Image (tube, rainbow, N blue to C red):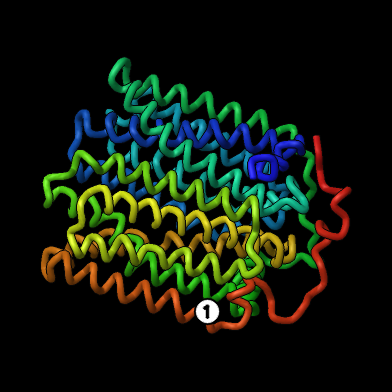
Amino acid sequence: MKSEILRPLSMPAFRRVWIGQALSTVGDGMFMAALAAAVLEDRSGSDLGLVLGAESLALVVVALGGGVLADRLRRSRLMIASDVLRLLCVVGFALGAAQGSLLLAAALAAGMGFGSGLFRPAHRALLPTLAPGLLPQANALLSATSRIAMIAGPALGGVLLAVSSARTAFWIDVATFAVSIVALMGIRDSRPQRQERTSVLAEASAGFRAVLDRPWVAAIIAQGTAQLILVMAPMLVLLPIYLSSRGQMTHYGLMLGLQAAGSAVGGLTVGARPPRRPGTVGVLGLGLGVVQLSFMMAGVPIALLGFSVFLTGLGYGLFGVLWASALQRSIPDELLGRVFAVEMLGTYALEPVGLALAPMAADVLGLRTVLTVALLALVATTVLPLFVPGVRAFADTEPSSPKKSELQPETAAHC
């Protein structure tokens, strides 16, 4: 398993991006810890919410445009531009913007979100060029590294806040962006080949059509939207409320770590041995959240709850790697950035709604009622997509012509 997962690292282009993104993700975690501390030093929690909301809103607004650009420009260059923008925003925070005007802090946070909206579609669409023929392994390695970095980043940020200051954490994050930029400068990818030049609006519409033309892709994105509002957001925001009500809030950090660990294990497992029915495994993997919801309703001991949280993360890891690999394999290269952008919209656009409504519903209806609704919604949204053609295989029901990158892997960029 280990040697299989590490195979993409033998490809110089993938290795460069992997190293840069591993460090950058650690920096992202440090940034979030530092930003919260810096804003709350002189401001209220509602001000922090405004700053974080500005970042989230900007990401959603620019996501589709980022997908269009990712299918027009050299993806590595778009990623560099995004990193430069975010580096400059973090420099602003390092120079004290969080303690200055709230409008300035929100604007810089929006700049971070804008940069992320440009970066993510390009990054995921670039992967088939970096690791041709090894998409499950590459996605698994990226997923596991990201999960580990998401644990390490906030932890390191907390240490820096204890021994130094938020500004130190910001400057280190600046350095991680610089490393990512240098790594990306060595990538020699080419622009996606487009059959004809059209307007930005027409190209954005083509991204939606590419999704709607593939019922299995549309079904999974719709599933993600429903689960995010009715299941995932409530699980995320209600877990600390649940623990607090039982006097177990000190275990919250452990729960987050267990979920991240489960996600890493799930991603590495299917990356090493991709299943014959990736859609079935991925969709049922998301259904593992049923265990956590049931255990929260039953009020089980903390050890059992931790096991269920690990299973939830395991399911997320299984699904994430199989889903990303399926899109990279099935969507034509010239449309891949836009399809990932549409998927991002389905994932993030309504996230604030679910996060805001779940606690309110718990106050009005009771925690158990909300958990019951989430449980029923998870069962329904897990079972129903399996009846859509193509979902069980995560592939078109009719064979299509192979992608150029699959026919000619020797032409993929290396550095």
Amino acid on which the number 1 mark rests in the picture: Leu
Indicate the position of residue 18 as horizontal and vertical percent values.
63, 37
Q: Nearer the viewer, residue 26 or 108?
A: 26
Quarter of the rendering occupied by the N terminus: top right
- Seen at 22% across and 33% down, the residue is 40
Indicate the position of residue 323 as horizontal and vertical percent values.
58, 62
- Seen at 36% across and 30% down, the residue is 155
- Pointer 1 residue: 386
In the rendered view, would you say 249 is above or below 56? above
In the rendered view, would you say 414 is above or below 339? above
Indicate the position of residue 375 as horizontal and vertical percent values.
30, 71
Q: Is residue 335 left or right of residue 411?
A: left
- Seen at 38% across and 51% down, the residue is 310
In the rendered view, would you say 49 is above or below 328? above
The answer to whether residue 349 is visible is yes
Q: Secondary structure at mark 1?
A: helix
